[in-house]
Amino acid sequence: MATDHRPRRAETRLQLVVRSTEIDINGHVNNAKYIEYLEWGREDWYERFGLDHASLLALGAVTVTVNLNVNFRRECRQGESLVVVTRPLRLGRTSFAMTQEIVTETGEPVIDATVTTVTIDPKTRRPRPVPEPLAAALVGDEAEGRSGGVG
Amino acid sequence: MATDHRPRRAETRLQLVVRSTEIDINGHVNNAKYIEYLEWGREDWYERFGLDHASLLALGAVTVTVNLNVNFRRECRQGESLVVVTRPLRLGRTSFAMTQEIVTETGEPVIDATVTTVTIDPKTRRPRPVPEPLAAALVGDEAEGRSGGVG
Amino acid sequence: MATDHRPRRAETRLQLVVRSTEIDINGHVNNAKYIEYLEWGREDWYERFGLDHASLLALGAVTVTVNLNVNFRRECRQGESLVVVTRPLRLGRTSFAMTQEIVTETGEPVIDATVTTVTIDPKTRRPRPVPEPLAAALVGDEAEGRSGGVG
Amino acid sequence: MATDHRPRRAETRLQLVVRSTEIDINGHVNNAKYIEYLEWGREDWYERFGLDHASLLALGAVTVTVNLNVNFRRECRQGESLVVVTRPLRLGRTSFAMTQEIVTETGEPVIDATVTTVTIDPKTRRPRPVPEPLAAALVGDEAEGRSGGVG
């Protein structure tokens, strides 16, 4: 995947509280639930740039995760407030990568992850170039034109 | 993490059927749900070697996942039968890694993953050496002594 | 809701095993997860009568749950084998009810539930008469014409 | 279950946003997920009265849901803000009931539910009288003595 842009790391921050049904027998958040938290963070990122599921579909694209690489740094418990930080890392022709971190309210690292996504054509299910508005958001041009929407 | 043993890849295979609540708006299994499937596969591996949560606790150890690296190869839909294949990859002093694959009934690859786990002391929450029975299972000695339990 | 038919209780039985991520901090299956098990049982019922989501949609209907009444009888733990028993209870004009039970392998009651469902038009989202093939399956006519499909 | 007290309906309100992994193939929140939302609301109620899991355990009690009766009034979609309203309904000797509603930000009803809970002894797993501090909170005495904690 060629890295031909230097993203400005237009970053979003999503706050959440750990809920009872997200806790497993060990009394801490289950690994799979963190993967959901990361998805919530990426969805929030897309939405803040006006690129939700319906908008991307209108552009002829669906995003599909092809790789997750996740480090688990710390246990979290019911009632803890967490922040999911999401920012672009790399942009290729038909794919891109994001860096995500989950931290506690005081900034302690919980999770760090790299998530690689491919844009596919919803009909053929084959990779297609990253749509221009999404590419612009990933390299930060779109972010510049916006006021205040991005945390 | 030193690799001082060559595991014999004592492999387990867990069958499952994709259920309706595991499907997202795209009509396919959500990424986070695959992470649950992988956990089910590892739990099955532990249980087949007599090393379930309670047994490990009795040995003074709890297993904690510290890294997940997952490739997503193919979409799956409600009603599909899948197999989670789990086998040891590496054994270190306080940690070990497993290779996991999810395949369709006809053997098509869905997921491949490497999962790195640390054994911690349940009281201090600090890393401790992999308990001997678990280490033996990971390098295959235990597997040899068993009859038929491992798919 | 008028009860103008006497269903023959064409019953399906779906087997499942309690998985690690379905367990909460109390070490037993979380309440919400049982609601998923019940949905899996109803989906299985629909499928066995050839009435899955796509087939109903082709008939111009979507099923929407409007009431759940669930009694919780017994705790269940990881690794337990359970059976979800599903059978029709009542058929009205635009709605119907099913009785569901979850039992252990030895028949001990875990859950009993009554689930009331309305059939709606997928476009108007308004109630519409229960499609004929579904009504037939609910009163048992369809069941008679089938061989062996219903557990 | 005798109703020998008239609860003052000490009410809590928990806000949440519908997340992507809570949506099913129909594009709306899955039924089982609403049951989780209801549990989050009850946990919030307990915590606001200083009666979280650990505190109740210290009083020799665990709460177990024995009946859920839930009406589903309206579909909800990703990104919607919802409020879970929780208040006591009835207090018996070893059990109690709560009324819960989920409403949209503009007050449209989504869910209404009655949830019946039994307090059990954590060791014998048999019903035991509702601990006094919990009974007081349920009838509203505790609520009076508190300032502002209850939304």
Image (spheres, coloured by chain):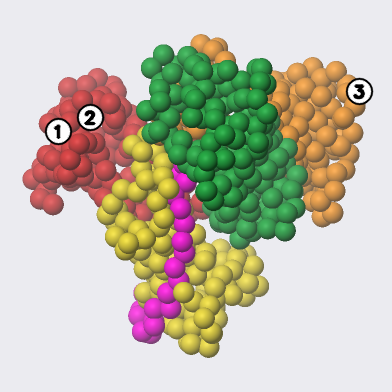
Chain colours: A green, B orange, C red, D yellow
- How packed is label 1: few (under 14 Cα within 10 Å), some, or many (20 or more)? some
Q: Which residue is mark 1?
A: C131
- What is the three-letter code of the residue carrying label 2? Leu
- Measure how far apart labels 1 and 3 are at the Cα level: 65 Å
Chain letter for the residue marked with disc 2 in the picture: C
Residue at 46% over, 35% down: A51
Q: Would residue C83 be seen by someone viewing this image from the given angle?
A: no
Q: Nearer the viewer, residue A104 or C27?
A: A104
Magenta residue span: D1-22
Asked which secondary structure carries label 2, the reply is helix
Q: In the image, are marks 1 and 3 on the same chain?
A: no
> Residue, x 22% and y 21% (percent of image)?
C146
Q: Which residue is mark 2?
A: C56
The mark nearer the N terminus, 2 or 1, is 2
Q: Is residue A41 above or below residue D82?
A: above
| Residue labelled with disc 3 | B4
Give the SS element for disc 3.
Answer: loop
Q: Where does residue A128 sit, x and y in percent of width and height?
A: 49, 16
| Residue furthest out toward the left | C4
Choose between D124 and D14: the one closer to the eye.
Answer: D14
| Dot 2 and dot 1 residues touching (CB under 8 Å) | yes
